[in-house]
Image (spheres, rainbow, N blue to C red):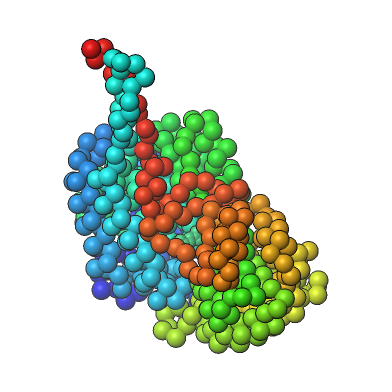
């Protein structure tokens, strides 16, 4: 990798302010060409316990820093991320596959959480409450919850760390991060910059591992860890929640989605097409908020699918490093096999492949063609399952009631989208959708300033915005008596 700042490429875990190598390592591959990029420390239970101990010790110091002092270190970390934008994006694309422009976008997006929560650090206010008796006075303060275990995914290897860790650090918590075994290099690069920014040893720790179950279990069973924040699959989220029950930890879960994208007859069709492309093909369809099911109303169904398919045909597929590429490879063989299976299922049940529908080039490639499926129906797997790939099934509907019922007919409830102009319907539909987030006439909803999170089996807790810090603090109430 041709980095300007070579020190950003680290391969050892980061514990108590030191890069720590282990005798066992595992390989990291470039998903575009399968080449080995690095061999990374394979930590186990003992390194995880060391990191938890270090974080617990550091908590006693870090929580005492003034909010302003914590904010200044966070601001420095933010600035260092922007100063190293090109290198961080190159590391991200090389290990994850997304196009370089998207990686740069992710680094800026990720850094924006650090800037935001640096500012929020000074605004962790309590209340004064009128007392319940003449001699009583009541106050609340918010205190950091303690050591946080952050378990983060491969689809946003940088931003999902900063979105969890920045509010935690701003509140005065310390963190032990377990990045995905597929993309630990972006996490380690953030550690290099965290050290340069001046976080004291033990405040920020990274455990790289192939053995996610053991490390996860060590985190969830440790009484020293007071909070688990996880982004990933609903299945793993349920497991972590069960494991956290024994020590009654606070938990935030940002899990899977099955986002509806609805286009009503009165929508601006060209804008809806662009919004659907952005919501579907970003990161090769591998985001939890990707449009999973597109619903087009009968009056515009044909126009919508024709315009949508012809634009999707133009999306350039290939190596994320090439500037003209819009859709990169999928992350691993298992993921592309799943996409092949759901497309085959849809075809077998009468769907029409309007464009794409197969792997690109040789059989061992992880490139899957941007695909549009027409005549999709509710008995197909694409209706129920999170596709997590560049495949857009399009369903026809007649009425508002029918589409709301179909949109809500899922266990998930993360993101949803719709396009239309009738203002009364906009309110009705936005209120009726059982989702944590609703994009109205837009396919892009992610931003630092808004609360990101879901309902139902998509999880709970909110990340970003003024609410993002709430998950990392406890409210303490003080009742003062005898005030005569
Ligand atoms: C996710 O897929 O979990 C995150 C997507 C985003 O923040 O935009």
Image quadrant for the C terminus? top left
Residue 152 visible here: yes
Q: Is 281 rendered above or below residue 448?
A: below
Residue 390 visible here: no
Q: Quadrant of residue 78?
A: bottom left
Q: Nearer the viewer, residue 331 or 271?
A: 271
Instruction: Give coordinates of residue 67: x percent, y percent.
Output: 22, 43
Image quadrant for the N terminus? bottom left
Q: Nearer the viewer, residue 348 or 448?
A: 448
Q: Residue furthest right?
A: 349
Q: Nearer the viewer, residue 98 or 346?
A: 346
Instruction: Give coordinates of residue 127: x percent, y percent.
Output: 31, 33
293 left or right, relative to 54: right
Instruction: Give coordinates of residue 136: x percent, y percent.
Output: 30, 17
Q: Is 406 rendered above or below residue 302?
A: above
353 left or right, relative to 24: right
Residue in view at x 44 percent, y 68 percent: 95
Q: Nearer the viewer, residue 432 or 167?
A: 432
Q: Is 328 rendered above or below residue 13?
A: below
Residue in view at x 31 percent, y 73 percent: 86
Instruction: Give coordinates of residue 323: x percent, y percent.
Output: 41, 84
Residue in view at x 44 percent, y 76 percent: 99
Residue in view at x 43 percent, y 31 percent: 223
242 left or right, relative to 71: right
Give the tally of numbered discs.
Answer: 0
Q: Is 337 rendered above or below residue 369?
A: above
């Amino acid at each position: 990798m041709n980095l300007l700042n070579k020190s950003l490429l680290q391969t050892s875990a980061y514990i108590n302010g030191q890069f720590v190598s282990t005798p066992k390592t595992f390989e990291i591959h470039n998903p575009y060409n399968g080449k080995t990029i690095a061999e990374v420390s394979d930590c186990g239970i003992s390194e995880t316990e060391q990191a938890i101990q270090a974080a617990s010790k550091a908590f006693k110091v870090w929580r005492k820093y003034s909010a302003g002092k914590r904010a200044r270190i966070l601001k420095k970390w933010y600035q260092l991320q922007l100063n190293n934008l090109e290198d961080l994006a190159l590391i991200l694309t090389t290990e994850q596959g997304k196009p370089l422009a998207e990686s740069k976008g992710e680094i800026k997006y990720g850094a924006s959480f650090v800037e935001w929560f640096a500012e929020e650090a000074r605004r962790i206010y309590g209340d004064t409450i009128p007392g319940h008796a003449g001699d009583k006075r009541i106050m609340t303060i918010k205190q950091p919850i303690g050591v946080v275990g952050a378990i983060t995914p491969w689809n946003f290897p940088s931003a999902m760390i900063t979105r969890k860790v920045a509010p935690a650090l701003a509140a005065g918590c310390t963190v032990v991060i377990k990045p995905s075994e597929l993309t630990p290099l972006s996490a380690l690069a953030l550690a290099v910059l965290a050290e340069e920014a001046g976080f004291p040893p033990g405040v920020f720790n990274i455990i790289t591992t192939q053995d996610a179950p053991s490390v996860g279990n060590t985190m969830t069973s440790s009484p020293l860890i007071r909070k688990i924040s996880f982004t990933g699959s609903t299945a793993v989220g349920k497991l972590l929640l069960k494991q956290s029950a024994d020590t009654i930890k606070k938990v935030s879960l940002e899990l899977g989605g099955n986002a509806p994208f609805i286009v009503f007859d009165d929508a601006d069709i060209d804008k809806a097409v662009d919004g659907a492309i952005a919501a579907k093909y970003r990161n090769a369809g591998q985001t939890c908020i990707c449009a999973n099911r597109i619903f087009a109303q009968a009056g515009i169904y044909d126009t919508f699918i024709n315009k949508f398919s012809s634009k999707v045909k133009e999306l350039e597929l290939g190596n994320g490093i090439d500037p003209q590429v819009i859709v990169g490879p999928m992350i691993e063989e298992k993921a592309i096999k799943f996409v092949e299976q759901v497309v085959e299922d849809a075809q077998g049940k009468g769907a029409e492949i309007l464009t794409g529908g197969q792997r690109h080039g040789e059989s061992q490639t992880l490139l899957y063609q941007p695909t549009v499926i027409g005549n999709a129906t509710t008995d197909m797997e694409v209706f129920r399952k999170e596709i997590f790939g560049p495949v857009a099934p399009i369903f026809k509907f007649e009425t508002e009631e029918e589409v709301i019922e179909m949109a809500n007919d899922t266990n998930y409830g993360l993101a949803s989208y719709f396009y239309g102009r009738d203002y009364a319907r906009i309110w009705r539909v936005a209120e009726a959708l059982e989702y944590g987030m609703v994009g109205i006439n837009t396919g892009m909803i992610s931003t630092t300033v808004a609360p990101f999170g879901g309902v139902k089996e998509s999880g709970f807790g909110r990340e970003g915005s003024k609410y993002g810090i709430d998950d990392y603090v406890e409210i303490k109430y003080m009742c003062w008596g005898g005030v005569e």
